[in-house]
Amino acid sequence: MVPIPGTKRVKWLEQNVAALDVELSADDLAALDALAAKVVGARY
């Protein structure tokens, strides 16, 4: 997954770039999968 953020401030750009260093554990991913299964409607 690749985020494509829009930003107008350098501070926010730095935060967005720092997000690339976030690593999710298997438990984190399982929790997110469980939440995603509850989403209703199309997402693009």
Image (cartoon, helix red, strand yellow):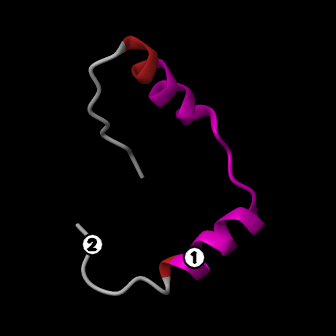
Residue 7 occupies quadrant: top left
Seen from the viewer's position, the closer of residues 2 and 11 is 11
Residue 22 drawn in magenta: yes
Q: Which mark is residue 33?
A: 1
Callout 1 secondary element: helix
Spot occupied by residue 8 in the image (x, y as percentages of width and height) = 27, 20
Residue 39 is situated, as x and y percent measured from the top left of the image, at 41, 82
**Residue 1 sits inside the magenta stretch:** no
Q: Relative to 35, does residue 26 appear above or below in the rendering? A: above
Which mark is drawn over residue 43? 2
The amino acid pointed to by label 2 is Arg
Q: Is residue 35 left or right of residue 9?
A: right
Q: Is residue 40 left or right of residue 19?
A: left
What residue range appears in magenta?
14-35
Q: Is residue 4 left or right of residue 28?
A: left
Q: Is residue 27 above or below residue 21?
A: below
- Would you say the residues marked 2 and 1 are in contact, meaning their CB atoms lie under 8 Å apart? no
The prevailing secondary structure element of the residues shown in magenta is: helix
At label 1, which amino acid type do we have? Asp
